Amino acid sequence: MPDPAPAPVTLDRPDPPGGIAVCRLTGEIDLDDHRAVAEAFARATALATTAVVVDCEGLAFCDSTLLNALLGLRREAAASGLRLVLAAPTGQLLRLLEISGVAGLLPAHPTLGRALESLRDGGPA
């Protein structure tokens, strides 16, 4: 029996001082992964106390499934008073955000470290 595909999203529990949850995207995310991504994003908003970071460094491919999930996460984060930022978005994801006209809604940083730094400094995401 083949090994099951790895989860498209893993969630790092928030660090107590910062209360920042990190969702790490890996591999390809498409319609088959909708439920797993939505559940991980929901857990992130439930666990975080200040912010959620979506780390895209391991993302190989995405389609509108991820776009819809990110917009849902943005809505939930805002309703919970959480900041939301993207870390290391791929060129494909940036293009998808630009084409759909929502790039300005999801602040992005070139690395996870820079994203975390921006949140901890309290400056603009």
Image (cartoon, helix red, strand yellow):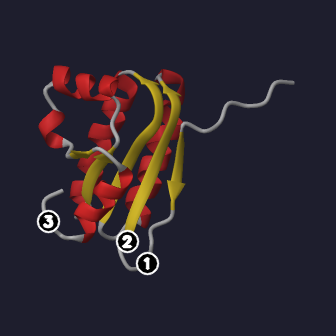
Tell me the kind of residue under disc 1: Pro
* Residue 19 in the image, given as x and y percentages of width and height: 37, 71
Of badges 3 and 1, the one in the foreground is 3
> Residue at the spot x=29%, y=56% of the render?
114
Q: Number of callouts in the render?
A: 3
The residue at which mark 2 appears reads as 19
Tell me the kind of residue under disc 2: Gly
> Residue at the spot x=38%, y=79% of the render?
17
Quadrant in the picture for the N terminus: top right
Q: Residues within 10 Å of mark 2 (few under 14, many from 20)?
A: some
Tag 3–tag 1 contact (CB < 8 Å): no
Of badges 2 and 3, the one in the foreground is 3
Tag 2–tag 1 contact (CB < 8 Å): yes
Under circle 2, the secondary element is: loop
Upstream in the sequence, badge 3 or badge 1? Answer: 1
Tell me the kind of residue under disc 3: Gly
Under circle 3, the secondary element is: loop
Vertical placement of residue 37 versus 84, above or below: above
Vertical placement of residue 31 versus 54, above or below: above
Q: How far apart are marks 3 and 1 (CA)?
A: 20 Å
The residue at which mark 3 appears reads as 123
Under circle 1, the secondary element is: loop
* Residue 85 in the image, given as x and y percentages of width and height: 27, 50
Q: Residue 16, labelled with which disc?
A: 1
